[in-house]
Amino acid sequence: MKELSKLAPTEGAKKTRKRVGRGIGSGLGKTSARGHKGTGSRTGKGRPAYFEGGQMPLQRRIPKRGFEPLKRKEYALVNVAALEAFEDGASVDPATLRAAGLVRKLGDGVKLLGDGDCKRKLNVTVHAVSAGARAKIEAAGGTVRLIVASAAAQE
């Protein structure tokens, strides 16, 4: 039985470390196994782990697909005050707003904002409406209806 004080690793389990820079006779003198010039010969070995020797890196040569960030909706904005241009009891929708020159480019639709006052009774149909704008139109006796885009139309 072996004594615990005399335990040693098995033969060949531990290698002696390279002692570089200890003269020509060691075989690892002069350039200390680093060769002449170039990145590897300098201290710090300034190359990242993903460096591929100058060839086109893997992350640049594979196709990019799969993730697309969510697109923010861009509405054409119309204030309640602008609706005073319409007659009492008129139906207002994106087409009539465009014809009246209040909307130039529709984008993702028309959003009604609550700046100004509305004294006319209007039936408004838009894609989005602020709470203040809805309250002002309904206070004047009008109605607000939202246009809901179907899932098939968005694809």
Image (cartoon, grey):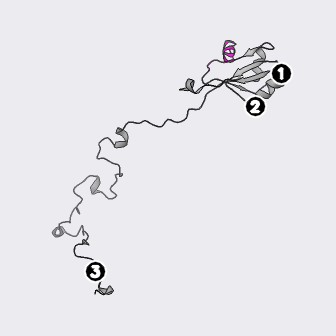
Q: Where is residue 133 in the image (x, y as percent from the top left)?
A: 76, 27
**Residue pictured at 64% horizontal, 26% vertical:** 75
Please tell me which residue lies in front, 72 or 53.
Answer: 72
**Residue pictured at 77% horizontal, 27% vertical:** 134
**Residue pictured at 38% horizontal, 36% vertical:** 63
| Residue under label 1 | 141
Residue type at tag 2:
Ala
Drawn side of residue 63 relative to residue 30, left or right? right
Q: Position of residue 142 (x, y in %)?
A: 80, 21
Task: Determine the image quadrant of residue 90.
Answer: top right
| Residue under label 3 | 8
Asked whether 132 falls inside the magenta stretch, the response is no
Residue type at tag 1:
Gly
**Is label 3 in contact with label 2 (beta carbons under 8 Å)?**
no
Which secondary structure lies at badge 2?
helix
| Residue under label 2 | 131
* 43 vs 67: above or below: below
Distance of label 1 from label 3 (alpha carbons)? 96 Å
Residues in magenta, as a range: 93-106
Q: Mark 2 Cα within 10 Å, few/some/many (few <14, many 20+)?
A: few
**Residue pictured at 34% horizontal, 43% vertical:** 58
Which secondary structure lies at badge 3?
loop
Q: Where is residue 62 in the image (x, y as percent from the top left)?
A: 36, 38
Task: Determine the image quadrant of residue 96.
Answer: top right
Point out the frontmost of discs 2 and 1: 1
Asked whether 96 falls inside the magenta stretch, the response is yes
Residue type at tag 3:
Ala
Task: Determine the image quadrant of residue 91.
Answer: top right
Q: Which of marks 2 and 1 is nearer the N terminus?
A: 2
Distance of label 2 from label 1 (alpha carbons)? 16 Å
Q: Where is residue 152 in the image (x, y as percent from the top left)?
A: 56, 25
Indicate which disc residue 96 carries.
none
